[in-house]
Image (cartoon, rainbow, N blue to C red):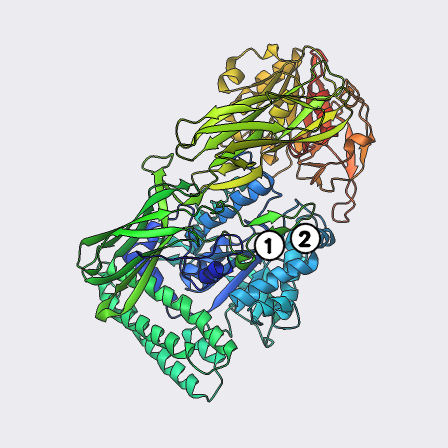
Amino acid sequence: MALQTEPSRRGSAARAAAVLLGIVLWAAAPAGAQLAPLSLDLGGNGLGLALRRLPVAGRVLYVTAHPDDEHNGVQVRLSRGLGLRVGLLTLTRGEGGQNEIGPELGEALGVLRTEELAAVHRYDGVEQLFGRAYDFGFSFSVDETFRRWGRDETLGDIVRAYRDFRPDVVLTLPLEAPGGGQHHQAAAQLAREAFRAAADPARFPEQIASGLRPWQPRKLYQGGVGGSPDAVAGPPVVLSTAAFDPLLGMSWQQLGSLARAMHRCQAVAQLRAEALTGDGAYTLVESEPPVAGAENDILDGVDVSLRRLLDFVPSGSPERAVLASGLDAILADVAAAEASFDPRAPEKAAPPLAAGLRRLQRLQDTFGASRLPDAVRAELAGRLEPKARDFEQALALAHALVFEARADAGLVVPGQVLGVTGTVWNQGSLPVGVEDVRLAVPEGWGVERLSGDVGALGPRQSRTFRFQVRVGEGAWSTRAYWRRRPRVDRHDLDVPAIEGRPWGPPELVATLRYGSVGGVPARLDAPALVRYPGRWVGGEKQRTVAVVPALSVRISPETAILPVGASVRHRAFRVSMSSYAKGAGTTTVRVEAPAGWKVTPSEATVAFEAPGQEVVTPFDVTPGASVGEGEVDLRAVGVQGGKEYREGYQVIAYDHIQERNVYRPAAARLVTLDVRTAPNVSIGYVMGTGDEVAAAIAELGVPVTLLGEADLASGDLSRFTTIVTGIRAYQVRRDLRAANPRLMRYAEAGGHVVVQYNRLEFNQRADAAGSAAGRLADSPFAPFPGFSVTGNRVTDETAPIRVLKGDRVLSTPNVLSPRDWEGWVQERGLQLADVRDPRYENVLASTDPFPNNPGEQAGLLVVAPVGKGTWTYTGLSLFRQLPAGVPGAYRLLANLVSRPRNR
């Protein structure tokens, strides 16, 4: 039996430390969305790219605020082109943004964008780090950003990253810029302060106590997203990304554009960039020691070669001479490997690569046991270890050696037994010696090797190893290790030891140890994956093994409305349960409500026929004899095998990312409020990129029909009193754009059209979704000229609302008051309208308190008469307020959908 144990997920400091040493894959090679390398990283081409990294020890860290702030062409230039180790520190996970491809918002959106960055890095070869700030949405104020993120805590995040990654050069965003997007400037200003603070052991001493060491980067530059030419002092250093790279088959900027296209939920363009566009311009901000004179490159004056390691050993010491001799010999081996490189015969590079790896291993042994100060030994270990991983990656490509681990199941439950198969393929012409194949598992799990023999593995041969794994009975569900701190825009960590990493390490990692040319020991690591078909021709997706609870419980809707005084005195809920336990037996489910409330049935019994099956049970919740406005909490509980389960998970799944599960308590809020809707109304809803507004309309007791392409093209629209278009619907629904004349005729005949916010695409008639004119033109989709969607917004959710003109939307059937604008979340509105025709009436306006967003903003709610009917545009962020259960948003929504035909 080959047993590897590691601590469990909570409190797993030792496991995290193992990851940081490179036992799993974090520092060895970029892990991608599909977890499979791109074709350019395979075979002789992959070997050519791997050789670029071997003589290089330089490191560059890019500090940004959100996913997509980075310059991907520059990252490809530095990582793929020059072989540098490049990191991207993103202070938030983008939770406050918008989603162009689905309904995920908030924390779920942060998970999606975390995975999209992993997909980006398959292309640009960059390592990802994260801060702990929560993206609270667009901001017009650096001061607001510091206040909500926690200035000192976020500074500490950057200092930690500097001390951990130890970059020679730091790139960041512009320090100053007018207007919005001030998260960018906040990130840059903190990156600048951290430049000195990271070198001071008196700053954030708790990091030093945890094992990090002070670090002084050589230089820091500003540039990139959100800058102002007037705010940048001095001549910029221009990093050309137009060079054609023969190993990539395109320019650095072109590959960067393919990487950037993985930011799909942000509607990043999918087309490959032109070859000669996209240079990066950066201006020097800080340097230590000071830079004298003009520069041509950010690496001017920076030693990025392996010989840089000599700087960390005391001058004149015998150890320095040993290190110098070893590094020179390694560089000679690298030169020999480069000279022998032949993509048609990669094995020619194997002997010098094996020799270089062996010399590295000897240096690791020598300096690991030396009497040098602890700080010096730690510095050398932290640089020799990832370089050894680089050599091992190149050596495996030279051997055409492939190692994979395949799991029999992707989702497992505590106590489950599953099989894992590790396979080694020697596709090259040189023999290797398979010395061992092991499977590392978390503490409390068991693993047994059932079959597979070590020994010589000749050319065109393979070897298979079969393992049986028993998941620990106390195994914690595989989930994000970060959680938003209640009522604070910052994350708490379940596993502090892996702070800054995108995810915790894979549950199962196989390790191959083999003998290369001359018996030089080498290793390959592979996370255990499960494969399944993708949704495209010949497509395949993979995911790492994930632990899920034996019973997943979810209740919907998560926010429900019960009008006070309405004739309907109960509210229907659905409890969905999925069981992954074999032979689960009897499972019961109940909904817990406050005292005095009645739940029917009080309990239900559920039978599962197969693992993974989902069963939905309806419940009715009825309040007590008297209930006023407020809200109550409901909780669903499943009981299986004598154990209670009170949470479930949402699957975040798209073809360009690895699937992830987002866990939530099985809880719902029932909001009781004084809200009325008009009788005999019927709503048609055109879903856009995904929102919960249609469900909120149904919560008001109003019938809602989702309209498809046939409905819009030829269906009977007159059966609806109001037709509502979802957020960004005109951007993503060609059928809606084509059917817009029918909507106008529907309004002329007495119907009511409500258009929720759209982006600048609303200002042009385009055949392709996602193309943006970026200009303020009359919208072809509005009923009259003189209407445009803008980029204006009101970001302070508490900003006062002023009524510009009375309209029934503010008074019928619910009279709105200042109280209805209380309790809003994240923002008031976005993509506000600009109207220049008197037929449009601005109903509301608001004013942000931020100098960078001066003046009163109208266009939050615009109404225009169209024939016998009405057309309404609203930039109010109802799509955020309704899921948050904001009472005033529901009352406004009720008024919007209650307008009768013929006004």
Q: Which residue is mark 2?
A: 149
Instruction: Give the amino acid at mark 2.
Output: Trp
Dividing the picture into quadrants, the one containing residue 251 is: bottom left
The location of residue 293, given as percent across then percent down, is 58, 75
846 lies left or right of 272: right
Q: Which residue is mark 1?
A: 91
Residue drawn at x 42%, y 52% as measured from the top left: 31
Report the quarter where the N terminus lies. Answer: bottom left
> Disc count in the image?
2
242 lies left or right of 44: right
900 shown above or below 316: above
Out of 559 and 736, give the one closest to the viewer. Answer: 559
Report the quarter where the C terminus lies. Answer: top right
Q: Secondary structure at mark 2?
A: helix
Residue drawn at x 71%, y 42% as measured from the top left: 795
The label on residue 130 is: none
203 shown above or below 36: below
842 shown above or below 776: above
The location of residue 852, given as percent across then percent down, is 74, 49
Instruction: Give the amino acid at mark 1.
Output: Leu
Q: Secondary structure at mark 1?
A: loop
The location of residue 813, given as percent across then percent down, is 77, 17
Residue drawn at x 65%, y 67% as measured from the top left: 204
Out of 514 and 331, give the one closest to the viewer. Answer: 514
**Does the rendering let one see residue 690?**
no
Out of 152 and 466, give the one closest to the viewer. Answer: 466
| Contact flag, marks 1 and 2 (Cβ < 8 Å) | yes
The location of residue 445, given as percent across then percent down, is 41, 51
335 shown above or below 122: below
735 lies left or right of 80: right
Rounded to the nearest angstrom, the CA distance separating label 1 from label 2 is 10 Å
